[in-house]
Image: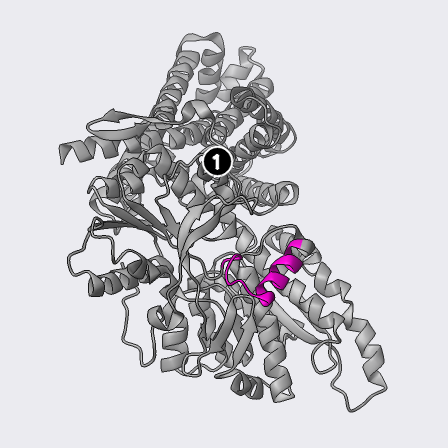
Amino acid sequence: MLEKLIFQGLIGLSLSMYLWLLAAGLTLVFGVLGVLNFAHGSLFMLGAYATFTFYGKLGLNFWLSILLSLVSVGIIGAILERFFFRRIYEIDLPYQLILTFGFILIFDDLVKMLWGGVAMIPPLPNFFEGHFQIVGRSFPYYNLFIIFAGAAVALLLWLTLEKTWWGRMIRASASDREMANAIGINIPLLFTTVFVFSAMLAALGGALGTPVRVVAPGIGTAMIIQAFVITVIGGLGNLKGAFVGALIVGILTSFGILLFPIFEMFIAFVVMAVVLMVKPEGLFGK
Amino acid sequence: MAKNISRRKFLKNAVIGGAAIGTGLGSYQITYGQAKKPAGPIKIGGQGAISGAHADYGWQMMAGATLAIEEVNAKGGILGRKLELKFMDEELKPATAVKNARYLVTDWGADFLFGVDSSGSAMALGPVLAELNRLHFFCHAATHRLTEELVAQRGIPQIFRMVAPVYQDALAAWIFKDNPEIKRWAGINCDYEYGYVAWNLFKENIKKFRPDVEFVAAAWAPFWTMDFSSHISAVMAEKPDAIFATPWAGEGVMLLRQALMLGVFDKIHAWWQGMGGSVDLLEGISREIEGDKFKGKLWGTARYIHNFPVSPENKAFVDAFRKRWGKFPNYSAEASYSTIYAIKAGVEKAKSIDREKVGAALEGIELKTPAGVRLIRKEDHQAVYTVPAGRVIKSPDYTIPILGDLRVIPAKDYFRHPPFTPVAATK
């Protein structure tokens, strides 16, 4: 039984990392810009489509395709922030939701127009094929890679925010926007870069999934609900919370499928409900 | 809003066939002067999933119907009236399917309805059809309850099903009953009606042949599952000899790819992919088949496969479809193509488009269709025809993998027959 749990936990860990990549950007934008960006899932989807196009259609190198898709989605993010989101920072949350929800619909239709409604899966890069033995079971190299990629992003984010000047500026403007502005931080520019950065995180999640997951309109919406659950569990706007939340949701979902196959997703929502009752601001919320 | 825009945009493309036939104005002008002839075209409203991971099925349905309508119209239509098509997206959502059907009948004026991919949508739509009073030919939704409960028991005469129901998925029981090495079965199934019924029917049937088999694990995946590795890993923990799986379309491709990554095919004797003979799934795994990654252990069936039967009707259909659309027809295309010809046969026999007369004309009729002779069973309005199961292979004669090593079990053996005993539609 222990071996079953270890293996299932490792599978859950790789699932957590996809969720973390998505939740990280969502919570970052909320923490710094104060916008709950539901269209974040659409950026995830655009990352997947861009990688599919560069890698699956044009046959470019897999890593180059990921890089190009991050750049493309980053540019889209910059346009979104500069021309749309910037106008809604000061207004009420419900209006912000309407705008971001509108973008979900626009992007879903846009990909249908450009790529068609049919789901696509590009071939798996050869170097990801195969698996290794752990507790007597076969664990895919690809899932191992995802675990490391997720952990690396977490480390990089922590280093950036804690150890760099840019990170300090971000933290300063997250805690007091006016004061940060007063001491000479260029807030509009900072917000654009944070938004672009979070868009690229979403795109990375989408891009890394392309070889094994499907690319289709609507995948962003399917993922954003889970990412939202995660940020609520961890505390909205809190990166550490998003990481822990992703671990909880991914691993518990995986255990749920093994131990209570009739419920599965149910467990993540139960955790969210309990957190909301006991600590409504989230595990790491202020 | 965006939903409407996309639907409108799609429809513009989807009805190119129907609209190009240009029935609307043209035939009104002709028929105005001839008071005794019925006015206008016969309107046929369809719906299927045309967005998301399952979108190819709805597209195929639309393509098959369009092809048949073009053929029929080129030969003068039905009773001198041209056919007109409108096709909508059901989004695999029951509420959308009901809304579409109401729109098609009350606003657009459909005389006949067809299509629907999801069993959930079909079950929601069934009772509404009695009220809308139009014949509806289901071309994909597979739950047995549609015909067994809604037609045979509750007597909703508007429902017809042209496509093989979930009995087809349980064909695995006949295919693997003589494999003594396969004792421990595990299921990875869709977390809704279709998955429940397929798995329950399979269990019931294989137990009859093989009382010694065990069902060691079952995992359930809802629509929009993108990562099946937890499901695969959970059932593999019980060391099954074989796996029975029902996720279809893009989800089926992902499931099989992820199973390969987890080394499943080194450990099991066979993998039954219910709709493994579906064209989009075969295209999706063609690279893996060429590399023999499944080691010949992947089996499946479909509700029609383009390489069976070897008959002039089937060859003509496959050739015409490939010429028109540049792809191989999938089962939802064959079912919608045959639906148009069933409407033609029914209307011509009844000499009317009256719902009751056409319905009565179709009961017990035998139709020559690409999939073989379809018998429309009177009791449950289910089309009975045989579809074999086979091993997924690469054939030099085809550009994509096909089902080979075909095992043909007559439909009368593996279809359920009225009066029906209940099968659980629960996990």
Residue topped by disc 1 = A36
x 44%, y 13%: residue: A160
The magenta region covers B305-322
Residue positioned 31% across, 34% down in the render: B263
Q: Which quarter of the image is occupied by the N terminus of chain A? A: top left
Image quadrant where residue B211 sits: bottom left
Residue B69 included in the magenta stretch of the image? no
- Residue B319 in magenta stretch: yes
Asked if residue B297 is positioned above or below residue B332 in the image, the reply reads above
Q: Secondary structure at mark 1?
A: loop
Q: Position of residue B2 (x, y in %)?
A: 61, 50
Task: Give above or below for B286 relative to A141.
Answer: below
Residue A163 horizontal side relative to residue A85, left or right = left
Question: Is any part of residue A283 visible from this angle?
Answer: no
The answer to which of A10 and A221 lies nearer the viewer is: A10
Q: Position of residue B75 (x, y in %)?
A: 74, 73
